[in-house]
Image: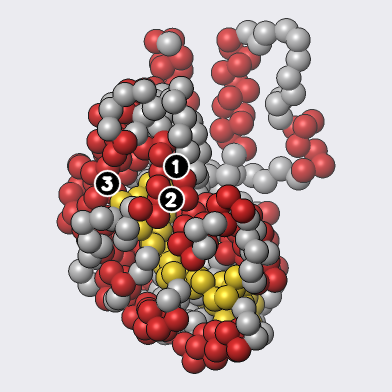
């Protein structure tokens, strides 16, 4: 192990220098991937020097998500204290299902969950778990809602037309999950949105009324804190009123921007969050931990047990159930995703998490101000969003983003809302400073000039 730890340090240093010197890796066309880089597997072992060189080649060619030229996704950057925690979790290699096997790591996960529940104003019965991704958190929420609505569904299956509601701009996992849950994709209603991509409450209400009239059974509403394209926040309070009236489960999908709960300045964007039945967030998005760190909490832990516990005598042999986390998780064996958020949180404190979140909004403001002050740009996004959507000189966003990538200049993606397609700049990398934000635009402008786009 000592030898490989040394090698790891060397490779990690190499990666960091690559991120600085070649922030966008040269893309390899899939047609020539296997000829370009030695990733085939064979019968013979590889000698150490070749092994190291191959690993370096792989590092060189892998897209650099922690560089200051990466704005492509809803994650990016690297916060070293969080990465440290994840590296430790790999070395420790616990599975989180029992206290016997994970010990203090269980305590660490429980502390995280408890702090998040407290922060959003859930009561004493609240609890949560970590899942392999925000999509799976949404899946768990829908499952708990299904079982809360129909206690027989777990054993007998779904027998009625159960209807779920989510906005047309919400994450695609909501529809996908409806098939896993057994209610079927066609039972997911797409609720209209306003010009900012926020769920329209009147449309929600009228679709619910309509479904009830037709003898269907509404059971679940998904609201979003930070929609995937525009970064819009649904009105949780308003939606909650409707959910209470019709007795529907309200889940808040905060995968992208749910971490605003850590900011005094921005937590108002999820006003009413304490009224939800479940809430999820991806710490690997706004909080900058390594992938994945997806957390779901629910106001009443009985739902977690109702939907996810199975008796397994071979597994649960010691300790009380509250510390045997396998009783409330989707998986059986489960990676320790909690430690990386804990090492970050422990080292920077609540104030540090707040700074991380606030900085992203600050960068978005810097970017929006730049765009507003330059008539070659058209802005499509709104205040209080860290997705800054724009077009430049009327150039097709798809062409621009693709060419910027092919020429190893920047990694940035594009998105659509209604009839517009635009570049979507995501200001989620907290290592980015104001000057890097400005140089993003300068790089883009110089590139357009030089390529005559
Ligand atoms: C990213 C995202 C998800 C999915 O999270 P994964 O971890 O990629 O599964 C769900 N909802 C929203 C709003 C997201 O932005």
Q: Residues within 10 Å of mark 3 (few under 14, many from 20)?
A: some
Q: Is residue 240 above or below residue 71?
A: below
Mark 1 or mark 3: whose residue is earlier in sequence: 3
Q: Residues within 10 Å of mark 2 (few under 14, many from 20)?
A: some
Q: Residues within 10 Å of mark 1 (few under 14, many from 20)?
A: some
**Badge 2 is on which residue?**
306
Whole-number angstrom distance, CA of label 1 to CA of label 3: 21 Å
For residue 360, say whether it is visible.
Answer: no
Q: Secondary structure at mark 3?
A: helix
Residue ranking furthest to the right: 31
On the picture, is 449 further left or further right than 87?
right
Tell me, yes or no, whether the two marked residues, 1 and 2, touch with CB atoms within 8 Å.
yes
Q: Secondary structure at mark 2?
A: helix
Please name whichever residue, 325 or 50, is drawn nearer the observer in this view of the structure.
325
Q: Quadrant of residue 309?
A: top left
Instruction: Give the colour scheme shown.
Output: secondary structure
Q: Quadrant of residue 245?
A: bottom left
Q: Is residue 164 above or below residue 284?
A: below
For residue 154, say whether it is visible.
Answer: yes
- The location of residue 8, given as percent across then percent down, is 44, 22
On the picture, is 62 further left or further right than 278?
right
Please name whichever residue, 118 or 217, is drawn nearer the observer in this view of the structure.
217
- Number of the front mark, 2 or 3: 2
**Badge 1 is on which residue?**
309
| Residue 112 marker | 3
Mark 2 or mark 3: whose residue is earlier in sequence: 3
At 52% from the left edge and 67% from the top edge, which residue is drawn? Answer: 228
- The location of residue 406, given as percent across then percent down, is 68, 54
């Amino acid at each position: 192990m000592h030898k490989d730890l040394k090698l790891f340090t060397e490779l990690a240093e190499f990666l960091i220098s690559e991120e600085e010197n070649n922030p966008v890796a040269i893309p390899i066309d899939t047609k020539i991937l296997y000829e370009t880089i030695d990733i085939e597997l064979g019968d013979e072992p590889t000698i150490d020097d070749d092994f190291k060189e191959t690993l370096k080649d792989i590092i060189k060619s892998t897209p650099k998500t922690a560089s200051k030229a990466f704005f492509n996704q809803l994650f990016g950057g690297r916060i070293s204290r969080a990465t440290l925690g994840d590296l430790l979790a790999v070395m420790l290699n616990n599975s989180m299902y029992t206290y016997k096997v994970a010990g203090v790591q269980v305590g660490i996960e429980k502390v995280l969950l408890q702090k998040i529940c407290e922060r959003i104003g859930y009561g004493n019965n609240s609890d949560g778990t970590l899942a392999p991704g925000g999509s799976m958190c949404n899946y768990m929420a829908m499952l708990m809602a299904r079982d809360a609505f129909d206690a027989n569904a777990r054993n007998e299956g779904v027998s009625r037309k159960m209807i779920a509601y989510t906005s047309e701009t919400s994450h695609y996992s909501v529809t996908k999950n409806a098939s896993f849950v057994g209610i079927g994709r066609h039972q997911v209603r797409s609720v209209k949105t306003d010009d900012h991509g926020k769920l329209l409450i009147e449309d929600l209400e009228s679709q619910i009324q309509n479904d009830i009239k037709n003898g269907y059974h509404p059971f679940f509403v998904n609201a979003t804190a930070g929609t995937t394209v525009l970064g819009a926040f649904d009105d949780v309070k308003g939606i909650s009123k409707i959910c209470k009236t019709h007795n529907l489960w309200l889940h808040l999908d905060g995968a992208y921007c749910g971490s605003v709960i850590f900011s005094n300045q921005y937590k108002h964007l999820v006003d009413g969050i304490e009224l939800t039945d479940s809430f999820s967030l991806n710490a690997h998005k706004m909080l900058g931990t390594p992938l994945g760190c997806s957390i779901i909490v629910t106001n009443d832990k009985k739902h977690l047990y109702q939907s996810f516990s199975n008796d397994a005598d071979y597994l649960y042999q010691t300790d009380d159930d509250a510390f045997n986390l396998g009783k409330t998780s989707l998986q059986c064996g489960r990676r320790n995703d909690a430690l990386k958020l804990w090492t970050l949180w422990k080292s920077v404190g609540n104030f540090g998490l707040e700074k991380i979140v606030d900085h992203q909004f600050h960068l978005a403001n810097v970017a929006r101000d730049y765009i507003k002050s330059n008539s070659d740009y058209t802005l499509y996004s709104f205040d209080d969003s860290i997705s800054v959507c724009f077009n430049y000189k009327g150039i097709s966003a798809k062409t621009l983003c693709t060419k910027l990538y092919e020429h190893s200049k920047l990694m940035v993606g594009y998105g659509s809302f209604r009839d517009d397609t635009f570049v979507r700049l995501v200001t989620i990398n907290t290592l980015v400073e104001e000057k890097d934000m400005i140089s993003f635009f300068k790089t883009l402008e110089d590139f357009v000039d030089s390529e005559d786009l």
